[in-house]
Image (cartoon, rainbow, N blue to C red):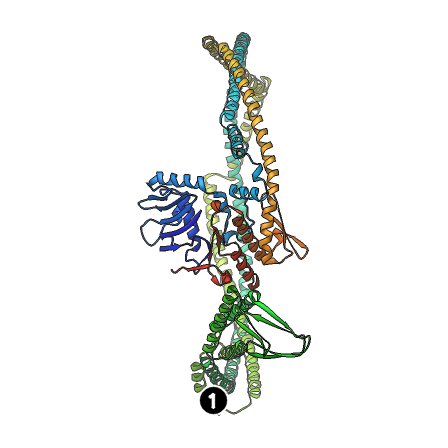
């Protein structure tokens, strides 16, 4: 399979792109990141595998977002005897077109075209090899898996000397065995098709027998249940009659208890009424006695209040005199505090003037230092503007120097070396330069272009290098010319001078950064114009005299005096406030006592008048006689209640109530059970009538017969599936053994190419699945997973190129390498180029990269640069 042309239209961010691929050799396709290099491989897979109307997520993801159009992919491909142009449009107005140019021209569209391409690929391309021969960005360090490639297997069989012993029917036999195996098992070994159906049929037959047996058992259970229910219903009828008789007796006893309880309730009501009358009479007599006692107490309290009023009057006069004296002292201390405050203000003004004078001195020095820093910054900026060697130019010079060193190493490795050994003292000319050699001395010359070696008067020799050495020298000369042009643009003589100049400019830049940091520190977030304005505003305090320490000491003394005066003033004010509070308290006490004495006299007068009015209605003796009479009647009613209570207790009312409730519950329970069992018996009888017409025993016999048939069929298929499984296992074991024989040719090819990169002692260990297990270098063996990312990348490319070199020409597929060798140093990059050159052959190697310099050492590569 070969890819000749690829056209993308409205695919992701690609409006239109057409790329032509050479039929053989290495092609390097380069472009910036996100320009759509990986999308080209994705588009080929989508074209070959996905229908144009697909709604898969990966198809939706490639739809352009800048226009309402469909993504289009066109490819021209040759595979085996076929060469065709295949085109698909996805999303909007989906379309598929196929034009086959050879061996017979065909034109198809739609699903018919899709199916035709799949048939061509199935006939001519090993798709497992096509997918394995790729190195993508997401798995550049992953191990290559070539075990599923039939094309590589055939090539390795031939290389291992096995092709002559094959009969030609081995693949067909394996396919027939797999076909027989797939009749009974899936790819993962689970039952399928007829074998799965037989298993399900047997399980269903077993379940049906169990279901029918359960139905027959259900009829037997219903018959037994009918007999049990009839016997239980007869017992419940007898229990129901006995419960009814017990309930009648309990109701009679409960009626007698209710009559006695009514009589007791009447007696209690009468006793409660008589007791209430007695309580009212007693309460009325007690209130009369309490009223008389309260009037006597009130008369005594009035005498005590009159004495307290006299004492309060004297205390009020004393407190008024003390308050007048305290107020005078507070006024005097307040005047002293005001004088001390005025002294503090004068001292603080003097200190503020001195502080502003010192600030003006510091600010002037700060502004002067800022001016000096600004001058130095301007000088650094002028020096940087005068320099022509920027970081970008220096990077270009370093890159060009690296390219010169790589090309020089390559030129030296490809160039011939001429050694001249003097058998006697002699003078000779080499490439126009005179060389004096003593006897036995050796002169060595590396020849990359036509070189003359002459012994004057004796012999003249011209050494002409091979074409590859000349080309390598030309490439080296071009690299040196490009480096010289960059040095000329930078205005320096050589790379060392460029580095020195670049270091000087970096020093100036660092100094500029330091000055900027110094300036920011001096400003401390302020603006220079603001600082200048502040300095101008402070000019009026420049002539202020006096010492700051002396002024602060005077201020502290004034503050201490003011603090003492304020403390004295506060103390005197508090004393005056306390004296005023004492006067107010004395006044309040005198007023309260006077008003309380007046209120008590009025209360005594009112109480005496009210008592006289009540005695006119009921005298104290009449109230006492009424209380005694009601006490006699209350005692008689209580005795009647006690007698009836004793009679009620003899009837045991609680036991009667308990017996009535229990008898009622028992009667209700027995009646409910009798009704429930009767209903259940009727239901069972109806069920038995239904069961009699269903023929459940006949269905059980049919189910048993079906189970026997299913078991017989299941046993037959079990024997056949077991045989197919055993045969397939034996064939797989022998196929794995045969694979071990063709590991050796693959290992030899990997080691042949790997020695170009790693050296002559390079070895690898490879398993039967053609995976690299370990690498041996300089006698040290390292597992593949423990290798560096660069070594894994290099081995992955070597393994794929080895597979491409071994596969027959008609079975070959393109090797695709997407942005690999990013972990590889310059020396191994050059050697990897030799590997690409060694396997270019008739196959295709497509390299996608954003750094084409990595593949500059591939001599026969063709380069295609993508643009946005």
Q: Could you say which is closer to the camera, residue 787 or residue 565? A: 787
Residue at 63% x, 57% y is: 760
Bin the neighbour count of mark 1 within 10 Å (Cα to Cα): few under 14, some 14-19, many 20 and up.
some
Q: How many marks?
A: 1
One can see residue 256 in this view: no
Q: Position of residue 626 (x, y in %)?
A: 51, 33
Q: Position of residue 658 (x, y in %)?
A: 56, 19
The C terminus lies in quadrant: bottom left
Secondary structure category for the residue under label 1 = helix
- Asked if residue 399 is positioned above or below residue 278 in the image, the reply reads below
Q: Could you say which is closer to the camera, residue 803 or residue 236? A: 803
To which residue does mark 1 refer?
A: 541
- Asked if residue 703 is positioned above or below residue 617 in the image, the reply reads above
Q: Position of residue 200 (x, y in %)?
A: 51, 23
- Is 110 on the left-hand or right-hand side of 428? left
Q: Could you say which is closer to the camera, residue 121 or residue 561? A: 121
Residue at 54% x, 75% y is: 570
- Asked if residue 119 is positioned above or below residue 14 in the image, the reply reads above
Q: Position of residue 751 (x, y in %)?
A: 60, 52
- Is 120 on the left-hand or right-hand side of 405? left
Q: Could you say which is closer to the camera, residue 251 or residue 492? A: 492
- Asked if residue 637 is positioned above or below residue 693 in the image, the reply reads below
One can see residue 785 in this view: yes
């Amino acid at each position: 399979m070969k890819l000749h042309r690829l056209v993308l239209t409205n695919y992701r961010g690609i409006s239109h792109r057409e790329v032509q691929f050479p039929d053989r050799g290495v092609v390097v396709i380069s472009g910036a990141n996100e320009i759509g290099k990986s999308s080209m491989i994705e588009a080929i897979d989508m074209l070959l595998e996905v229908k144009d109307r697909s709604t898969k997520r990966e198809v939706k993801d490639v739809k352009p977002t800048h226009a309402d159009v469909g993504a289009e992919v066109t490819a021209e491909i040759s595979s085996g005897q076929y060469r065709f142009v295949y085109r698909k449009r996805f999303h909007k107005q989906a379309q598929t077109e196929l034009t086959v140019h050879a061996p017979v021209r065909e034109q198809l569209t739609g699903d018919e075209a899709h199916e035709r391409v799949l048939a061509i690929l199935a006939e001519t391309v090993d798709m497992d090899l096509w997918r394995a021969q790729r190195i993508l960005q997401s798995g550049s360090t992953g191990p290559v898996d070539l075990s599923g490639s039939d094309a590589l297997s055939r090539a390795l069989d031939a290389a291992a000397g096995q092709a002559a012993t094959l009969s030609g029917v081995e693949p067909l036999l394996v396919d027939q065995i797999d076909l027989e195996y797939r009749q009974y098992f899936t790819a993962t070994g689970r039952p399928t098709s007829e074998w799965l159906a037989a298993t399900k049929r047997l399980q269903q037959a077993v379940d049906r027998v169990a279901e029918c047996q359960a139905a027959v058992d259900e009829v037997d259970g219903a018959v037994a249940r009918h007999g049990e229910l009839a016997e239980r219903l007869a017992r419940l009828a007898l229990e129901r009659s006995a419960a009814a008789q017990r309930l009648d007796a309990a109701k009679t006893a409960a009626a007698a208890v209710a009559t006695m309880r009514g009589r007791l309730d009447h007696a209690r009501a009468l006793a409660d009424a008589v007791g209430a009358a007695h309580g009212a009479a007693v309460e009325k007599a007690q209130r009369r006695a309490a009223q008389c006692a309260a009037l006597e107490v009130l008369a005594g309290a009035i005498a005590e209040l009159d004495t307290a009023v006299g004492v309060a009057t004297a205390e009020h006069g004393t407190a008024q005199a003390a308050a007048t004296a305290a107020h005078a002292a507070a006024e005097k201390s307040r005047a002293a505090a005001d004088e001390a405050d005025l002294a503090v203000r004068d001292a603080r003004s003097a200190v503020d003037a001195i502080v502003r004078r010192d600030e003006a001195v510091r600010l002037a020095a700060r502004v002067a230092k800022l001016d000096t820093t600004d001058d130095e910054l301007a000088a650094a900026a002028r020096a940087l503007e005068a320099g022509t060697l920027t970081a970008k130019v220096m990077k270009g010079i370093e890159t060009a120097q690296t390219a010169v060193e790589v090309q020089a190493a390559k030129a030296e490795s490809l160039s011939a070396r001429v050694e001249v050994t003097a058998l006697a003292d002699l003078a000779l000319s080499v490439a126009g330069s005179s060389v004096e050699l003593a006897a036995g001395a050796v002169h060595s010359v590396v020849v990359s272009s036509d070189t003359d070696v002459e012994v004057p008067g004796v012999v003249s020799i011209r050494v002409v290098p091979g074409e590859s050495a000349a080309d390598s020298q030309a490439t080296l000369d071009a690299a040196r010319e490009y480096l010289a042009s960059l040095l000329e643009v930078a205005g320096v003589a050589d790379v060392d001078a460029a580095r020195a100049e670049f270091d000087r400019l970096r020093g100036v830049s660092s100094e500029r950064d330091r000055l900027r940091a110094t300036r920011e520190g001096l400003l401390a977030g302020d603006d220079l114009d603001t600082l200048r304005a502040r300095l101008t505003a402070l000019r009026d305090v420049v002539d202020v005299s006096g010492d700051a320490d002396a002024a602060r000491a005077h201020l502290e003394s004034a503050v201490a005096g003011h603090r003492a005066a304020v403390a004295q003033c506060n103390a005197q004010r508090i004393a005056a406030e306390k004296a005023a509070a004492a006067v107010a308290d004395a006044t309040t006490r005198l007023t309260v006592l006077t008003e309380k004495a007046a209120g008590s006299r009025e209360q005594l007068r009112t109480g005496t008048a009210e008592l006289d009015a009540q005695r006119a209605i009921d005298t104290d003796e009449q109230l006492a006689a009424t209380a005694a009479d009601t006490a006699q009647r209350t005692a008689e009613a209580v005795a009647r209640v006690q007698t009836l209570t004793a009679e009620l207790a003899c009837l045991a009312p609680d036991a009667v109530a308990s017996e009535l409730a229990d008898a009622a519950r028992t009667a209700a329970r027995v009646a409910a059970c009798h009704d429930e069992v009767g209903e259940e018996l009727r239901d069972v009888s109806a069920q038995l009538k239904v069961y009699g017409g269903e023929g459940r025993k006949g269905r059980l016999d049919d189910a048993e017969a079906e189970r026997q048939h299913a078991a017989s069929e299941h046993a037959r298929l079990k024997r056949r599936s077991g045989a197919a499984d055993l045969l397939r296992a034996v064939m797989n074991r022998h196929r794995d053994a045969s694979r071990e024989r063709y590991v050796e040719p693959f290992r030899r090819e990997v080691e042949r190419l790997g020695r170009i990169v790693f050296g002559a002692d390079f070895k690898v260990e490879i398993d039967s699945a053609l995976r690299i297990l370990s690498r041996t270098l300089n006698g040290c063996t390292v597992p593949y997973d423990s290798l560096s990312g660069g070594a894994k990348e290099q081995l992955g490319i070597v393994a794929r190129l080895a597979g491409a070199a071994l596969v027959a020409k008609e079975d070959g597929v393109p090797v695709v390498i997407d942005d690999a060798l990013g972990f590889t140093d310059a020396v191994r990059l050059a050697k990897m180029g030799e590997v690409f050159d060694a396997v270019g052959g008739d196959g295709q190697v497509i390299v996608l990269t954003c750094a084409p310099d990595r593949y500059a050492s591939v001599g026969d590569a063709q380069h295609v640069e993508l643009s946005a």
